[in-house]
Image (cartoon, grey):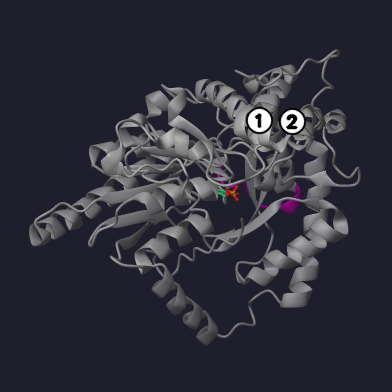
Amino acid sequence: MAAVKTLHFDSNPPPFGHEMRKCFSFDPEYINMNHGSYGSLPSPVAEAIKPYYAMAEANPDLFHRFTSVDLIRNVRERMAKFIGAAHTDEVVFVPNASHGLNAILRDFIWEEDDIICSCNTTYKSISKTAQYISDIPPHPENSQFTILFPTTNNEIIENWRTYLQSLNEARARSARRLGRRPKIVAVIDSIISVPGALLPWKEMVKICKEEDVWSVVDAAHSIGQELDLNLAEADPDFWVTNCHKWLYAKRSCALLYVPKRNQHIVKASFPTSHAYISPKKRTGPNFVEQYEWNGTLDFVPYISASCALDFRAWLGGEHVINAYCHRIAIEGGKRLAQILGTEIIDQGNDFQFTLNMVNVAVPFPATMSSDFEIDMAFRRKLLIKKKIYPAFFYHNGKWWTRCSAQVWSQVEDFEVLGEVILEACKEIIDEFGDGSERTMTDVEDNMEKLAVREPNVQSNQEVVCIYS
Ligand SMILES: Cc1ncc(COP(=O)(O)O)c(C=O)c1O
């Protein structure tokens, strides 16, 4: 079987910090503080995958019919070990987390009175997937769990238990009426996008099991950021991660993990594969086969995951990389909060939600509007004009910035960012006002709209997350 070539390096890596920028292809003037959204490809990985592109073009048939299939099997084996799956054949590649999560959620056979639940902090396109599923027959109920930062892990866990128990009571009432037990499917983030926060997802999965709820874990930010993944032990029902974010694989590369016991749920890959066999005609598994070919796409990003692991080993391995990024996230976040005169979202709770993304409040007045235009203004001012960019989002009545710390980051980057944000805030208030001019009727109108959108959120706790 063809195997992906291991990367060899003749020298030691540059030290972490700005020197490490040599290993990436950034515009020398750009300070990348938003690795979390799209990831960043190391140049050695970009070089290492060139021969695979050459192979694909040298003989497209040979590459697509034989070579890439073998190579990807080889990488799947490595990735399955890396995430602690019990079997290689529980892990397949998909282009991105949205793809994997959609495949799972749409493959359930939904019935009347089933419940699909997500959180107010679920990545928008995934909560919209839940909304869409609920919008079409047989209209399962779309329910939302609320997490408002600042909070604590204990509070989230307790609220989650209470929430699932209340769904279970509703299910028991439906079951008496229908004469069958509806299902409940919960989407849980391992690491939320905004705020960039590690959730106690393993405990949440455990509670799902206790309450007989399917757990679908959106782990888009996990691989490469969350250490010592052991899926066989955590045992979620489904789990999807993006390798093109924190692992440094080439975009588009994600892993879909489905333990063997649940592969019957994922009846057809998305899109449907020529390898699809009708469930009634199956004599064995049909999960991996479908995902080995379900439409022509660029397979080299999948191969790049293996090269990314070699590159990371050269840097010192997972613990060394993440210890540096985490330290810079905390130190940089503190410095930024100091410059802005604000706070880090979990500074009062021992940074229990912070891995390599730190969330710092933006110094706007409390009256500031939550409009998407404000986010767009930050994009224009920082990304285009100032060539420095973290993410911005509105949560629980405030604007925040989510800064990603990476092997190329230094605390000085957060200092530059602080000054740029202060300037941008002044300009934005000049352009858009600080919200204090809004009449009471405007505010009440907004509250009413919000109460319609977020039925389980009290009207004074606005929750609008605007960011990818
Ligand atoms: C939590 C979360 N889920 C899903 C996604 C979607 O990832 P992709 O665009 O690669 O499908 C993202 C992207 O940032 C995310 O942060």
Tags 2 and 1 touching, CB below 8 Å: yes
Residue shown at the point (30%, 66%) measured from the top left:
139
Q: Which residues are magenta?
A: 339-346
Determine crowd level at label 2: few under 14, some 14-19, many 20+ residues with C-alpha closer than 10 A.
many
* The magenta stretch spans residue 343: yes
Depth check, front residue: 318 or 263: 263
Q: Is residue 359 left or right of residue 461?
A: right
Q: Is residue 42 visible?
A: no
Location of residue 118 in the rendering, given as x and y in whole percent from the top left corner: 40, 54
> Viewer-proximal residue, 246 or 164?
246
Instruction: In the rendered view, tell whether residue 351 sits above or below residue 446.
Output: above
Which residue, given by chain and number where applicable, does mark 1 sit on? 303
Can residue 135 be found in the magenta stretch? no
On the image, the x and y values in percent for residue 104 come to 41, 47
Question: In front of the other: label 2 or label 1?
Answer: 2
Residue marked by disc 2: 52
* Residue 297 pos. (x, y %): 64, 45
| The one of 202 and 275 positioned closer to us in this rendering | 275
**Is 317 placed above or below 308 here?**
above
Looking at the image, residue 13 sits to the left or right of residue 357; the answer is: right
Left or right of 151 on screen, residue 394: right
Residue appearing at x 62%, y 39% in the figure: 253
The secondary structure that most of the magenta stretch takes on is loop
The amino acid beneath tag 1 is Ile
Instruction: Give the image quarter of residue 131.
Output: bottom left
